[in-house]
Image (spheres, grey):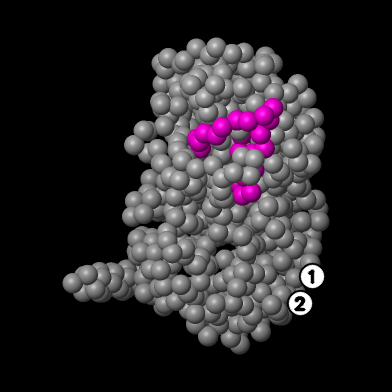
């Protein structure tokens, strides 16, 4: 019965697509809308067409600014927008579909169409994109037996099919042949750098064709080398192979190589990722590229009639907990991406186009394509709301019962991963007990993803008299020495683990979070664990909570830092003084007089340590000025309002001495030792 129902739905979809196509081809007797490849060139409605595109990701821009950013991309001279579709945004829980707000992809695509821009849609299911888990929903990691992501594993493919059976019918009416803006649809992403499972790619093609038909160009994107193109291209399935390569490389030998992986006459020269900048991890210097050399490299493609898609035209922001991460040769060589995804793109994170790179690329596009120069858009006004004093509202331990739903507390002999506990993002608090013997004990957690803060207290005291013992980190994991509390009972052990963003690229993409090994104290495995998932949904009523009054002064706590990868953190005032008052919640208010005064702004966290910030209950992202390089978080005007505005900060260690943040229009963006 289920198979029959599915067949009926698929038949209905095909009939609807045929009707849309017929209507599109017969309006006013005009020539049928068509986009295709012939004679090694793109063609649109009977005329040769050059793609001058740019990535602008709807999920990294507050929806109220979609139109603004697209207009800025159009003024740059672009005729095409490329965007990924992150599966984890649209199916946050199994069979729970989200297509509102940031996830309203149909509205975004229609808006591009209204602005007379074409679309290249990258539907995954894997997208990379410096996005958590490469766009995969993290609940995939909780399935047993473990799925083989990005493979022909039948269990994995069945979930991809379920996802695409929801997504692709929404996309199909917006194909170019059906009167919409979508000219090409990408399957997977840079698969040739990961594997060579052609059966997997073939299955994706069959699935895409089932819902989209045969009249849309399907494409892959891979690095411009023999190995990556050999592994990732599938011309036998009539799938166009596009390439990417480092900006500044000679593009034309790579385009000639591209021809070997497309059918004769079907290899329009296209770099689907022309890098305008690069990503930045915490602890690095802000990545920048020279405007003049970037423009020169683009000119070498466009002025010889090649096509290019700027990655990125506009980077945007990794709001919330969606930033990705990378590893080196070992999974412990972990580097999380910043909250900002500015990417040194021509359209800056906050929309600025009055910069050398935007102007240089705009001139090149005009020179090579003859696209008329549109008026240069004005920058969006930004507001300077000044210093805001924050008050401590509560310690995490004081209000644990308020931000952790008791039915969601997991109990297990061994620690569970975040995914097993149902906590897909953010923080998970682990609790167990041990018998403290001697002047100190040695705590070992061989595998923790990603960062664990350790606290201890005498069990009879509960969370009172707790002491901060130190931090164990994925990238510098060493045993932690914990001073004895001389308890008359057992000692309670609290381990707060932060998921700092899942790996989005490479062999270690199956990146579970939390404590992923046994926990040992003096060589003895600790058992009987409780896992408390933290929810930030109630932050709007934080000030109404009645926190427990603490008996001890946090300044008596001692910090023991181990590992050689945290010299920058040791240099911060917090680590120099050996103090820890966190994790704590702080709240501040600022007033905006009228709607006309509501403007974009930045919050500077100079002097703070590490945490997450919320403005009017909106998660604007992570801050970590103790590490750097990002010191200020972008706050788009639509998040703000006339009247009272509320900032809540979850600070993991300790606030700046004045307990203030600064809302500024022109931030001193970099801080830490990377300034």
Along the line of sight, the residue nearer the viewer: 660 or 16: 660
Along the line of sight, the residue nearer the viewer: 422 or 136: 422
Give the residue at mark 1.
250
Distance from disc 2 to disc 1, alpha carbons, whole Å, reads 7 Å
User: What x and y, as percent, mark residue 566?
Assistant: 76, 38
Picture quadrant of residue 506: bottom right
Along the line of sight, the residue nearer the viewer: 440 or 615: 440
Q: Judge from the rendering whether residue 138 lies leftward or rightward of residue 446; answer left or right.
A: left
User: What x and y, as percent, mark residue 193?
Assistant: 65, 69
Please tell me whether residue 570 is drawn above or below residue 298 in the rendered image: above
Pointer 2 and pointer 1: residues touching (CB < 8 Å)?
Answer: yes
Range of residues picked out in magenta: 430-453
Instruction: Tell me the residue at 71%/63% (across/down).
Output: 368
Mark number for residue 561? none
Instruction: Tell me the residue at 42%/59% (across/down).
Output: 143
Instruction: Tell me the element at label 2.
Output: helix
Give the residue at mark 2.
253
In the rendered image, residue 116 lying in the magenta stretch gets the answer no
The residue most toward the left is 1
């Amino acid at each position: 019965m289920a198979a029959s129902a599915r067949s009926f739905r698929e038949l209905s979809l095909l009939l609807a697509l045929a009707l849309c196509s017929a209507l599109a081809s017969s309006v006013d007797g005009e020539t049928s809308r068509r986009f295709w490849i012939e004679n090694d060139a793109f063609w649109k409605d009977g005329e040769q067409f050059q793609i001058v595109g740019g990535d602008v990701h709807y999920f990294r821009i507050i929806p109220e600014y979609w139109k603004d950013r697209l207009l800025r991309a159009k003024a740059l001279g672009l005729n095409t927008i490329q965007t990924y579709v992150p599966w984890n945004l649209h199916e946050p829980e199994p069979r729970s579909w989200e297509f509102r707000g940031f996830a309203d992809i149909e509205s975004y695509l229609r808006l591009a169409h209204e602005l007379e821009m074409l679309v290249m849609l990258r539907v995954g299911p894997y997208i990379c994109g410096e996005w958590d888990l490469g766009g995969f929903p993290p609940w995939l990691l909780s399935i047993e037996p473990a799925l083989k992501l990005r493979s022909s594993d039948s269990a994995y493919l069945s979930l991809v099919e379920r996802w695409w059976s929801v997504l692709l019918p929404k996309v199909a009416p917006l194909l170019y042949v059906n009167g919409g803006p979508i000219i090409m649809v990408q399957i997977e992403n840079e698969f040739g750098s990961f594997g060579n499972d052609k059966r997997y790619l073939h299955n994706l093609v069959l699935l895409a064709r089932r819902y989209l038909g045969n009249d849309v160009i399907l494409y892959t994107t891979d690095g411009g080398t023999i190995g990556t193109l050999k592994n990732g291209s599938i011309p036998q399935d009539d799938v166009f192979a596009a390439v990417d390569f480092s900006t500044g490389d000679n593009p034309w030998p790579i385009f000639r190589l591209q021809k070997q992986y497309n059918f004769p006459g079907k290899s329009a020269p296209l770099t689907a990722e022309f890098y305008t900048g690069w990503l930045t991890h915490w602890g690095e210097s802000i990545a920048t590229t020279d405007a003049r050399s970037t423009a020169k490299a683009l000119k070498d493609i466009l002025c010889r009639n090649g096509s290019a898609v700027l990655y990125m035209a506009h980077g945007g922001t990794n709001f919330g907990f969606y930033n990705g991460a990378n590893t080196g040769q070992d999974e412990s060589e972990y580097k999380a991406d910043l909250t900002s995804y500015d990417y040194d793109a021509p359209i800056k994170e906050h929309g600025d186009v009055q910069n050398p790179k935007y102007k240089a690329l705009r001139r090149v596009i005009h020179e090579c394509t003859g696209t008329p120069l549109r008026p240069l858009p004005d920058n969006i006004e930004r507001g300077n709301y000044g210093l805001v004093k924050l008050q401590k509202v509560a310690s995490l331990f004081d209000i644990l019962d308020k931000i952790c739903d008791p039915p969601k507390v997991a109990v297990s002999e061994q620690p569970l991963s975040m995914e097993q506990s149902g906590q897909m993002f953010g923080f998970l608090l682990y609790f167990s007990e041990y018998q403290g013997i001697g002047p100190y004990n040695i705590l070992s957690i061989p595998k923790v993803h990603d960062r664990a803060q350790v606290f201890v207290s005498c069990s009879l005291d509960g969370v009172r008299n707790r002491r901060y013992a130190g931090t164990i980190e994925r990238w510098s994991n060493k045993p932690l020495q914990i001073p004895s509390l001389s308890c008359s009972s057992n000692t309670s052990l609290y381990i707060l683990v932060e998921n700092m963003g899942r790996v989005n690229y490479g062999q270690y993409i199956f990146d579970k979070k939390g404590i992923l090994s046994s926990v040992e104290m003096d060589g003895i495995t600790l058992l009987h664990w409780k896992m408390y998932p933290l929810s930030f949904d109630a932050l709007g009523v934080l000030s109404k909570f009645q926190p427990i009054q603490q008996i001890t002064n946090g300044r008596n706590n001692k910090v023991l830092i181990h590992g050689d990868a945290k010299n920058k953190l040791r240099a911060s005032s917090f680590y120099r003084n050996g103090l820890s008052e966190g994790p704590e919640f702080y709240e501040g208010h600022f007033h905006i007089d009228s709607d006309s005064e509501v403007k974009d702004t930045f919050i500077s966290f100079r002097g703070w340590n590490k945490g997450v910030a919320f403005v009017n209950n909106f998660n604007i992202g992570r801050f970590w000025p103790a590490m750097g390089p990002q010191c200020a978080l972008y706050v788009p005007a639509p998040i703000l309002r006339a009247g009272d505005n509320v900032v809540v900060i979850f600070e993991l260690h300790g606030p700046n001495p004045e307990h203030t943040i600064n809302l500024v229009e022109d931030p001193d963006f970099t801080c830490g030792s990377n300034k």
